[in-house]
Amino acid sequence: MKLIKYLSAVVVGGMLLTACGKGGQPTSTDPGAYSSATGAEYGEEEDAFDVADYAEFPQGPGLIFIEGGRTVLGSMEEDIAMTRDNVERTVTVASFYMDETEVANIHWLEYLHDLKRDSLPEVYQAALPDTTVWSQQLSFNDPYVTYYLRYPGFRFFPVVGVSWLQANDFCVWRTNKVNDILAQQANGGGGRRGLFGRGGGDEAVEGEKPSIESGYVLPNYRLPTEAEWEYAAQAMIGTQYTEDENQNNRRLYPWDGHQVRNPYGKQMGKFLANFKRGRGDYAGIAGSLNDGAMITDYIYAYPPNDFGLYNMAGNVNEWVQDVYRPLSFQDVEDLNPFRRDGFLDESTNYDSSEGYHSLVSDEVRVYKGGSWKDVAYWLSPGTRRFMAQDSSTATIGFRCAMINAGSNK
């Protein structure tokens, strides 16, 4: 009897040891074959709890990793409008992913192609950008109305004329599209073993999509929060020259210094962003065009910031997730700050029903970054403006973001 108890103890002890990873403790990527809580073997029986093989999955297409940390958000520019709606405060932003560039016309045309093929006509119609945003009664921008979205030469220029609502719909489509491709890879011959189980003869069912537990599903593409966008635009990682927690300076723009021209090397004197240089001056003079763009520009134009992100200042403004409130900075949390609605600052506090004294409501969203049509003031990451979520202009585009899943940083 004692021998049986001894053998039982040895077996259970061995199972628990097997549950540990190579380093002696189980991890997400090496959980072991047995539960460290119960000793049960993962996937031992057909209906047993199963743990899919998991390796840290590569980031989604088009994305750059943004390492989070502490920063000071808020405007460093003189508050020329005296709104005081982005007062400096210290916050922490978790790591996330962000598009390397603004979403381009070619990406939107791919989106329209899929909708036209797979959706109802009214869904396709609702996704069409408003190309009339280029039309001005006292300006001859007519060619852009017809050609800007669809002409091949503009393929990699930022899409404009899209509302905040349309941008969110694009994010939903992009998430489904990317994960559908991953599912096809998993169901086909190139998928990794264990997407739908740890082996034992399990076969992927045709058309079945991997579950979240499989680790083979990317999180949702979405618009960045205002805090994420501003943090990514600052790119303060480029000011930390030592391994301590000191940063030498804050940044007025996504680059060092107080000027908007490159102060170094062969590109000395060239503008670092696409913006309006002054009254009536969008690009300089013929034969020596400086920023080189009278309207938008190539999404990879101008040097990237220290996170590797292009055009975080100028080219087009960009939608972010947040509902606009002038005093959000004093209401939101200091970890991953975000205003999703009117909590603590309801729209009824603003007189928008009679006389239209205020434009603030739960249907207005923040946009950031400055555009080809804005002066340098709006290039500073701390500046902010807002517009109705169903409106669009020739100066606002967007880029997508994604959470850093499975990480506490």
Image (cartoon, rainbow, N blue to C red):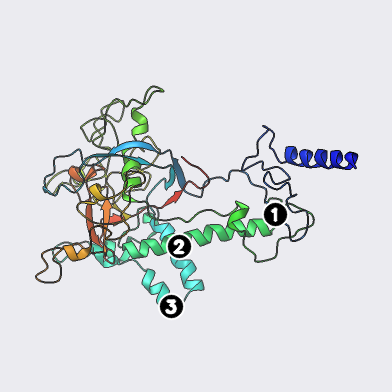
Q: Earlier in the sequence, mark 2 or mark 1?
A: 1
| Mark 2 or 1, closer to the camera | 1
Residue drawn at point x = 25 percent, y = 41 percent: 291
| Mark 3 or 1, closer to the camera | 1
Q: Mark 2 to mark 1: distance in Å?
A: 29 Å
| Numbered label tally | 3
Which numbered disc covers residue 93? none
Q: Which residue is mark 2?
A: 172
Q: Earlier in the sequence, mark 3 or mark 2?
A: 3
Q: Secondary structure at mark 3?
A: helix
Q: Which residue is mark 3?
A: 121
Give the image location of residue 162, x and y in percent.
32, 63
* Mark 2 touches mark 1? (CB < 8 Å): no
247 relative position to 188: left or right:
left
Which amino acid type is marked by label 3?
Answer: Pro
Give the image location of residue 381, x and y in percent.
26, 43
Which amino acid type is marked by label 2?
Answer: Val
Quadrant in which the N terminus appears? top right
Q: Quadrant of residue 257?
A: top left
Give the image location of residue 249, x and y in percent.
27, 28
Q: Which residue is mark 1?
A: 50
